Image (cartoon, coloured by chain):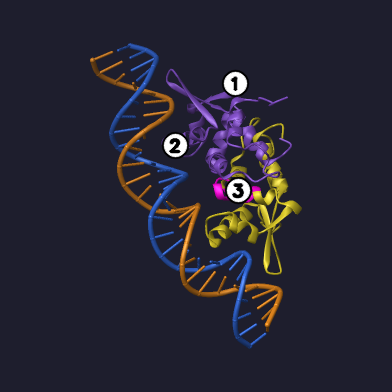
Chain colours: A yellow, B purple, C orange, D blue
DNA sequence: TGTCGAGTTCGATGATTGTCGAAACCGAAG
DNA sequence: CTTCGGTTTCGACAATCATCGAACTCGACA
């Protein structure tokens, strides 16, 4: 196969012909599934807060050990939400020693932003 | 100057303590629920396409009778998706004669856009 | 008044999701 | 090699969701 079928990224979305703001033209059905997956990942209060903590983390990354105690829910559930964010392409994870660090993917965030507002 | 005093929806969400881009600060848990509901509404391929058709409609509005035939799914299901979009605050509906017209709410769209990208 | 068409609501059903505890995994430190 | 703490995976369960057909509501019109 010519493509590694990774999580979504900007290049794939451009290939789908989808970058124009939705105020300007209809989103093609082929791109809608991929884009909806990213919006869906943000469509949970816990995940939205996780995403904001990751995106606003000083140094651009944050340890799971700093995310988990910030919520009332269990560790496995936090891990599940992080997996959803990762599979949507909004974050990446890297293990260093015993700890796992998450990092935002600003290109996709800008992609979604631009979809919602022409001025993005 | 005291406050920029933008559109009403933006100010309302400011009252929730939420307007700063998520790359800048963590989204407060009180605001996360409302914002996540809007993202969740966009987290379905059909609804994302519906939203883009509404937002890009000439004249700013579009009839349900123009939306329904654009998809393979039944009328009741289209109606259900439009209801979800309406309850999230992303669209409004107005009945005129026999037809119902949907219209986008650009203030909330800009709100979500600005959350994802500081430059929005 | 009665009928017709556009759209919504209702009720049901199969699929997906959020959550947890238990277990497994993976480096690091004894 | 064994233990330990951080993180993920597994298995289960209740709740939510997308979808449909049937029934209903609302205007228009004859």
How crowded is the residue under tag 3: few (<14 C-alpha within 10 Å), some, or many (20+)? many
**Left or right of residue D13: residue B92:** right
Residue A17 locus on image (x, y percent): 68, 41
Q: Residues within 10 Å of mark 2 (few under 14, many from 20)?
A: few
- Queried whether the magenta region covers residue A42, the answer comes back as yes
Callout 1 environment at 10 Å: few (<14), some (14 to 19), or many (20+)? few
Residue A118 seen in render: yes
Q: Which residues, given as a range, are shown in magenta? A: A41-52
Earlier in the chain: of badge 1 and badge 2, it is 1
Q: Which residue is mark 2?
A: B80
The residue lying toward the viewer, choosing from B63 and B30, is: B30
Label placed on residue B59: 1
The local secondary structure at tag 3 comes to helix
Q: Describe the element under mark 2 as helix, strand or loop.
A: helix
Q: Main secondary structure of the magenta part?
A: helix
**The C terminus of chain B: image quadrant:** top right
Residue drawn at the location 49% of the way across and 32% of the way down: B86
Q: CA distance from mark 2 to mark 3?
A: 28 Å
Above or below — where is B58 with respect to A63? above
Judging depth in this view, the residue of B64 and B43 nearest the camera is B43
Which one is in front, B16 or A13?
A: B16
Q: Nearer the viewer, mark 2 or mark 3?
A: 3
| Residue bearing mark 3 | A49
């Amino acid at each position: 196969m010519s493509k590694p079928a990774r999580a979504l990224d900007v290049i794939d979305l451009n290939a789908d012909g989808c970058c124009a703001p939705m105020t300007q033209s209809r989103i093609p059905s082929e791109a809608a599934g991929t884009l909806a997956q990213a919006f869906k990942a943000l469509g949970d209060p816990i995940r939205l807060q996780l995403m904001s903590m990751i995106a606003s983390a000083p140094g651009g990354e944050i340890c799971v050990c700093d995310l988990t105690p910030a919520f009332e829910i269990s560790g496995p559930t936090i891990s599940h939400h992080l997996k959803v964010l990762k599979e949507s392409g909004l974050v990446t994870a890297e293990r260093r020693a015993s700890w796992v660090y998450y990092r935002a993917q600003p290109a996709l965030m800008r992609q979604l932003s631009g979809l919602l507002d022409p001025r993005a």
